[in-house]
Amino acid sequence: MTDRQREILYAIIEEYAELATPVGSVTLAKLFDCSSATIRAEMVKLEQMGYIMQPHTSAGRIPTDAGYRLYVNSLQENLDNDGKKKDDSQESVNTDRTAKALTTRIQAQSRADYAIRTAVDSLVELTGNLGLATIGEQLYISGFGGLFSQPEFIQNAQVQAVGKLLDNIKPWLQEVQPNEAINVYIGSENPVGKTSNVSLIISRFRSPYSDRSYIGVLGPTRQSYKRVMSLVRHAGLMLEDIIYD
C-alpha cells in the first residue's frame, strides 16, 4: 500500500464516521486537491486489497473490517501509556478537554462502585455508544437508547446480534481476559455477535472487586476511533488512580 492509498483509506474512515454515508471520489478529491479520476483509481486498488467496499452500485465507498483494523492498529501505535495521542492536532486538544471533564466526574465519587458507574455513564454521554464495566461479578451496562438510535441498527437482525453479544460478554471477558492497555474488537472479530456490525473497545483496570476489571464501550464499527479509544483508556487509568489513591 502506498502512502497516498493509506491516507485515502484513513480519510474514508474518518469521513464515514462523521457523515454515516458512503464517501465518494468528489469529496476526497477536494481533500487531496487532485482529480476525481485519480481518487477513483486509488479506491479501486483499495477495494481490491479488501480495505473498502461499495455498498451498492453508484455509491461511494465504506470501510471494511480489514480497513478499520489497519486504521486502529496505527492508532494503537500512537497512543502513549496515558491513553493520549502522540500529536498536537485540534482533535487531540478537544479530546484532552473531554478527558478532563471525565476525570472531574469520576473524582467527585467517594465509593469505587459509584466511580465505575459514573465513568460508564460519562462514556455513554461523551461517545454516544453503549457503556459497560465489570464490577465484581456484576456487569454494569448503560446507554441502550443511544446505541440503537444509530442508523446501523434499523434492522431487527442487527439489534438481535448485538443482544447476543451482550448476553455473552461477561463470561467471554472472564475466559479470555484481554490484557492490553486498550483492546479493540472490530465487527466480525467479536467473539459472539459477529454479524452485529459493532466494535467493542475496552480497557483493563485494577479495582478492589477483581484483578481483572474492565471498562469500555460498544458502538457501531463506524465511529471516531481516535477519540473513543483515548477516552476509554483514560477512564480506566482514572479509575485506578482514584480507587487506589
Image (tube, grey):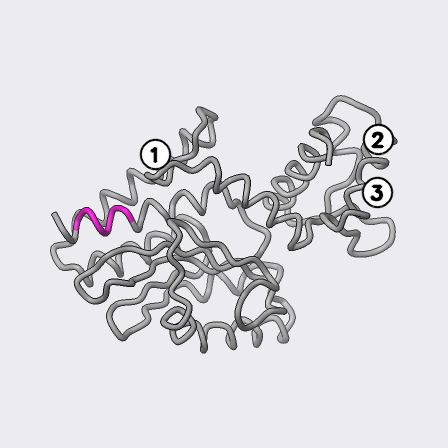
In primary-sequence order, the first of circles 1 and 3 is 3
21 w.r.t. 77: above or below: below
Mark number for residue 97? 1
Mark 1 / mark 2, whichever is N-terminal: 2
| Circle 2 residue | 36
Q: CA distance from mark 1 to mark 3?
A: 39 Å
Prevailing SS of the magenta stretch: helix
Name the side, left or right, on which 174 lies relative to 229.
left
Q: Are marks 1 and 2 in contact (CB under 8 Å)?
A: no
Q: Is residue 27 above or below residue 210?
A: above
Q: Nearer the viewer, residue 239 or 204?
A: 204
As helix, strand or loop, the secondary structure at mark 1 comes to: helix
Disc 3 element: helix
Left or right relative to 56: residue 146: left
Residue at the location (70% across, 27% down)? 31
> What's the magenta region?
237-242
Q: Residue at coordinates 41% horizontally, 56% vertically from top-left?
A: 202
CA distance separating discs 1 and 2 = 37 Å
Residue 23 painted magenta: no
Identify which residue, 236 or 109, lies in the foreground.
Answer: 236
**Residue nearest the observer in this picture, 49 or 96:** 49
Q: Relative to 27, is 162 on the left or the right?
A: left
Residue at image mark 3 = 44
Q: Quadrant of the N terminus?
A: top right
Q: As shown in the figure, which amino acid type bears the numbered disc 2?
A: Ser
User: Tag 2: Cα neighbours inside 10 Å, few (<14), some, or many (≥20)?
Assistant: some
Residue type, mark 1 in image: Arg
The CA span between labels 3 and 2 is: 12 Å
Of the two numbered discs 3 and 2 in the rendering, the one whose residue sits closer to the viewer: 3
